[in-house]
Amino acid sequence: MVQAEQTLQEVLNAFDFGAPVVGAIRYGQGHINDTFCVHTQPEDACCRRFILQRMSAAAFKRPDQLMENIIGVTEYLGREVERRGGDRSREAMKVVRPKNGEPYYTDSQGGAWRLYPFVEGTVCHQAADTPELFAASGRAFGRFQQLLKDYPAETLYETIPNFHNTEDRLAKLKAAVAADKLGRAKECRPEIDFMLSREADCSVALDAMREGKLPVRVTHNDTKLNNVLMDGVTGEGMCIIDLDTVMPGLVIYDFGDSIRFGANHSAEDETDLDKVNLDVDLFAVYTRAFLEGTGGSLTDAEVRYLPWGAKLMTLECGIRFLTDYLVGDEYFHISRERQNLDRCRTQCKLVADMELHWDELQAIVGECRRR
């Protein structure tokens, strides 16, 4: 963090902002990249802002591949927005190249930096406080899919291999249980058994993909509410941000991660499991809005498998939390003991609640399909 600030002036000098830089301050609540808001002052205009980021070397080993993905997708989105009469400057991110013309700037310490114009007049929410806000995020992520429906997903790099390979995630859990290097398996036997009893579920989406039922598309892979910039006046989703995990994938995973994150009212590490429940009404709200945003661009099978996306993303996340707990909390940051185990337990409770309401979830999707 200190190193990023020490190198900041070197990096600022590497970009042409079109006006004098009058300030650069740390910005946002992200925990992966170092992010700064750069303020410039044109002579005859209001202050113009930019988002400057140093990409995490720990999370992203190949910034060249990462930025090739992002530039390809953002330029395509920009052209689609313009073709449909939209405002490219507010509805699609744009990469500003450094003076040397490369996709990003490499500083004297080896750090990789990128620059985006700030999307003015927008708000970033951390939680869906109202059904209307959750619906707005659903329409935005659905529209993201609609705009990219013809993008050749096979041209994208898989920047995080096996990111949503639930079979692989379960295999890693089994290995962690077998090794039990910290002797923790005995205290979470119910959670281990819960995951292992759903081994067949881990192959449902992957089998459908291998059989050609579910097409591989461009997916965002981090569809939380705070990755949608909302219009400050209308409250509608304007621009999808944080494209670091844009990769080839299944659209049901993007849908499912939003449900996991937003269709319940508990903290991810809630210890009182009575407070952890799937909100079926919010599931319905998001499903309708998401499909509205996709504009009919999904196949019938993709729509039918949406409940599976919600269940599998929640199950997979629980598997990852449990695996990390067993190996010693190496991946997910913790602020207290057993936090990853508590996180796993909330995911198990959500999966169980989805199973309890499974017929209802399928009925909601079926009603949306018939509209």
Image: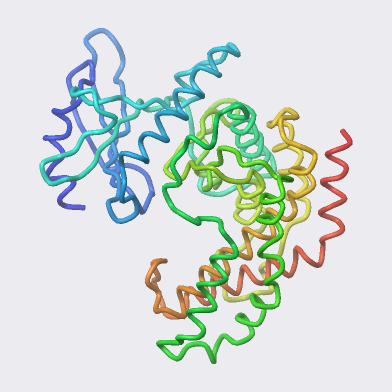
| Location of residue 336 by image quarter | bottom left
In which quadrant is the C terminus drawn?
top right
Q: Position of residue 282 (x, y in %)?
A: 73, 50
Q: Relative to 208, does residue 289 appear above or below in the rendering?
A: above
Residue placed farthest to the front in the image?
A: 211
- Looking at the picture, the colour scheme in use is rainbow
Q: Residue furthest top?
A: 44
In the displayed structure image, the side of residue 59 where residue 167 appears, left or right: right
- Please name the residue shown 61% across and 63% down the image: 266
Residue at position x 54%, y 28% from top?
A: 238
- Residue at 72% across, 50% down: 211
**Closer to the camera, 309 or 29?**
309
Q: Is residue 177 left or right of residue 293?
A: left
Does residue 212 appear to the left or right of 22 in the view shown? right
Closer to the camera in the image, 54 or 296:
296
Judge whether 145 appears above or below 244 on screen.
above
Relative vertical location of residue 346 with respect to residue 222 in this rendering, above or below: below
